[in-house]
Amino acid sequence: MERKTAPATWWLLTSLYTTQYLGLGFLVVALVAILRDHGASLDQLGLIYMLGLVWPLKFLWAPLMDKVRFGRWGHYRVWLLLTQGGLAVTLAAMGRFDVVGDFWTVYLLGLAVAVLSASQDIAVDGLACRLLTPADRGFGNGIQVAGNLFGNMLGGGIVLLTYPLLGWQGSMLTLAAGTLVSLGQLLWYHEPSWASVPTAGANLLRCAVAFWTRQGGRLWLLLVLLYPVGSSLAYALIVPILVDAGWGMDRIGLAVNVLGSLAGMAAALATGWILPRLGRRRGMILAALLQIPGIGAIALPVFGMTDDVTVTVAVGLYFLFYNPAATVLATLMMDHASPERPATDYTVQYSLNMLFAMAAMSVAATLAGQIGYGGVLGSAVVAALLAAMLSLRYRPLPEAETAGATARPVQAATVGNLP
């Protein structure tokens, strides 16, 4: 019989996936603007952007979080309590220092926020892999993508807009208070008692080799690496184009971080809802094809149409057509995660995907100087077409394609719901 995910589970996952991005979104978006407004150097701003590199490296300690358990207190629940509490304390502590005069102290605390948020993500992904049935993973990953966008919008957009009123300390305390919402939920949450399953331990190399050498692993690896390249190339063009056109950071933030994020949230949730009805394979192919018109929409600002209405439409279409692909890919990553080491398997896939996405964004800046914005956009379309062609060869795991029916046998015996 199919398990139904309890409403409290959805609220907990929504909260965790949102609050994990509050501090990080603030650091890589709002803090850059605040420091620049105070006359910080470009070298300092570059250091802030480097904080985002922590997330692709989280696979290094994911096996440890799968291995270390805490008995009756809960496996992933305790990790979440530690990381969520650490985030709240660290964000509050940052507010006690001067953002310019104590830059290095603020920076080191920001690094702690990046590490803690990445670790929280490992734990919540591991918990979600075990809690959600194949039928519920589509909507669960829709919540993940939408929650990340919402957290980024709140931390990187809304808090920045209220910064003149709240000031530095008030903004940091606001972020800490928002993070405490999830901590309160976790205090009342009782993680199911998972049955013992064999584990490969905390050897990262062994885990990675075992994962990618499974049947169909090489094709899946290519898809994980190639799927985000086209959209990442296109996304890297948006801000430089608007800056060249004379847009201020406030207008860019509203169009990209707020309105774009809202469109992406709607697309992610809709994709998560329809994916079980559509099926994994058809969903993946359609999502890959949808990336192409989303990338094509960026042609409007690329070729000089940079008025408010046109840019808002172009950015909205990009987010609307990209986030179905992000949701489907995250769902399939969860399908491929084993019950023995769900956090590690999911994180290894996610980290590789994110590394290639970030690499594509970096390459876009270099390519733009050589072949222009139009040439980079054309390359993005080609990459998206290759991803779509590759997705035609993909065959989902049998138990996932029937999504709905039942979870994998070992999971069905070990997974419970929130009370």
Image (cartoon, rainbow, N blue to C red):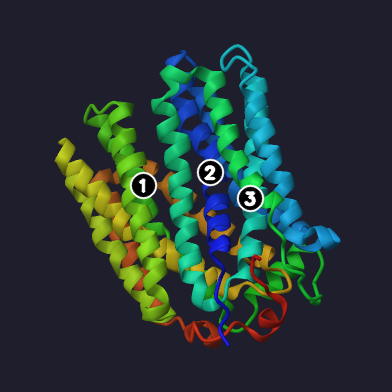
> Amino acid under label 1?
Ser
Q: Quadrant of residue 365?
A: top left
Q: Is residue 354 left or right of residue 235?
A: right
Quadrant (top left, top right, bottom left, bottom right) of the C terminus = bottom right
The residue lying toward the viewer, choosing from 219 and 187, is 187
Task: Please report whichever mark, 3 or 1, sits nearer to the chain's N-terminal start.
Answer: 3
Task: Please report whichever mark, 2 or 3, sits nearer to the chain's N-terminal start.
Answer: 2
Q: Taking the image as drawn, is residue 175 in sight?
A: yes
Mark 3 or 1, closer to the camera: 3
- The 10 Å Cα crowd at callout 3, few under 14, some 14 to 19, many 20 or more, is some
Circle 1 — which element? helix
Percent across and percent down for residue 358 are 48, 49
Circle 2 — which element? loop
- Residue 261 circle label: 1
Q: Which residue is mark 2?
A: 21
- The 10 Å Cα crowd at callout 2, few under 14, some 14 to 19, many 20 or more, is many
Point 70% across, 45% down: residue? 83
Q: Is residue 99 left or right of residue 276?
A: right
- Residue 381 circle label: none
Q: Are marks 2 and 3 in contact (CB under 8 Å)?
A: no
> Amino acid under label 3?
Gln
Q: Which residue is mark 3?
A: 185
